Amino acid sequence: MKEYFLILLSTVLVNNFVLVQFLGLCPFMGVSRKLETATGMALATTFVLTLSSACSYLVDAYILEPLDIVYLRTIAFILVIAVVVQLTEMFVHKTSPILYRVLGIFLPLITTNCAVLGVALLNIRHDHSFMESLIYGFGASVGFSLVLILFAAMRERITVSDVPETFKGPAIALITAGLMSLAFMGFSGLD
Amino acid sequence: MITAIVALAILAVIFGLALGYAAVRFKVEGDPLVEKIDAILPQTQCGQCTYPGCRPYAEAIAKGEADINQCPPGGETTIIALADLLGRDPKPLNPEHGEEKAKRVAVIDEQVCIGCTLCIQACPVDAILGAAKQMHTVIEDECTGCDLCLPPCPVDCIDMVEIKSTTDTWTWDFPGNLPENLASLANRVNPAASNDDKTSSPLEETSSKKTGTEA
């Protein structure tokens, strides 16, 4: 139990996927203009990351390893991720058409979110068990959501504040992201 | 090598079946075309098109039951936008459904109002505020100027007032609303007229060309 908690803490804060490992920066910059969309994106990504992390573990442990075709890992994982994203897209389209419209192109683009593939591959590298992979994926997505929502809230304030002309727009957003990353580096002392 | 191909193929088939099932299970009802048509309509919910609101009218257009020229509040701009979306020729507004008027809001003469709540029930956008035997008033920002509250009023205390532009509300006209462009839009509506007109401006030429390619 304590082990699971440590994995969770490590993925959410210490080894945060966005700010410490720099994975999944595209949606981090792309969908963080409004808090609402960021929250929706965070939820969708949480769902996809957790599910694809578990699914890719199952595919690896019960199909790739017994058949000795682990060199197909990347392509098999991409297949799994694409299917999970497609499922999520259908589900969101059915349950919340408004969220579907707001997320727009970023929903199918979760497929290319490198954090998703990164989590699946890191699970294998760390020799995680099924539960550990599940927790790892969930922790990664919670960390992603946390950072995305915090960043979106900050960007909403920055747009209305008096930023020097040269720094307006993406420039100040990137600087903010850098400062956030610095702050998150401070969590490495928790080890 | 063979194992790899077979294994991946089987995996893909399983996922394909799962997705196929999900596509049936989470099938979205409704036509995306209806959404697009509905977005063009002015959302006054006035019912002048003989349908109970803008959405039912949009559904009727999508099914091909209704024509695109039945919306007086939207006027020519809406007809042309609909024609562009559906790839049809624009046509003039059908006079059976009313004529295009300037934007108006309802104003209740509060001295005369007896608080019967009949206009509240008639309002499609809930823009009238009031209670039984209390004076009613119209929330101007919500009012779409649809005239539906006029017939039920027993004391005729509702007036439709044109919105005059003030320094707060005035904006530049869209290029399409300038008088000379409106003339070219009219030509688009009657392509025959633009053919007779040999001295057409470049803008007219492009617009009539566009109609030609669509047809």
Image (cartoon, rainbow, N blue to C red):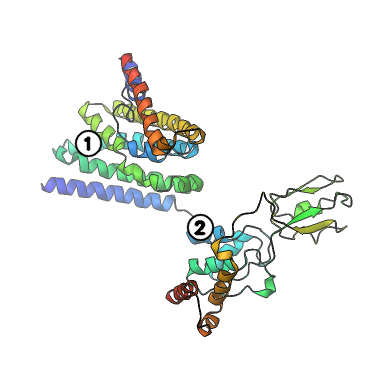
Q: Which mark is residue A60?
A: 1
- Is B111 displayed left or right of B39 in the figure? right
B45 left or right, relative to A1? right
Q: Distance between the residues labelled 2 and 1?
A: 39 Å
Q: In this view, does B204 lie above or below A17?
A: below
Above-or-below relation of A112 to A6: below
**Residue A83, placed above or below residue B162:** above
Q: Quadrant of the C terminus of chain A?
A: top left
Where in the figure is residue B120, as x and y percent of width and height? 77, 51
**How busy is the neighbourhood of tag 2: few (under 14 within 10 Å), some, or many (20 plus)?**
few
- In the rendered image, residue A74, in percent from the top left (x then y), is placed at 21, 40
Let me know if marks 2 and 1 both belong to one chain: no
Name the residue carrying label 2: B30
Question: Residue B207 at x, y = what percent?
Answer: 48, 72
Q: Which residue is drawn at 32% across and 37% down?
A: A52
In the rendered image, which quarter is residue A83 located in?
top left
The N terminus of chain A: image quadrant: top left
Chain for numbered disc 1: A
Query: Which quadrant holds residue A64?
Result: top left
The residue at the far left in this view is: B1
Residue in the picture at 63% in, 70% down: B70
Q: Is mark 2 on a helix, strand or loop?
A: loop
Q: Which amino acid does label 2 sit on?
A: Gly
Q: Nearer the viewer, residue B181 or B23?
A: B181
Q: What residue type is labelled 1?
A: Asp
Instruction: Name the residue at 49% across, 55% down.
Output: B29
Instruction: Using the image, name the chain to which the residue with label 2 belongs.
Output: B
Quadrant for residue A51, please give it: top left
The x, y position of residue B150, in whole percent, is: 79, 60
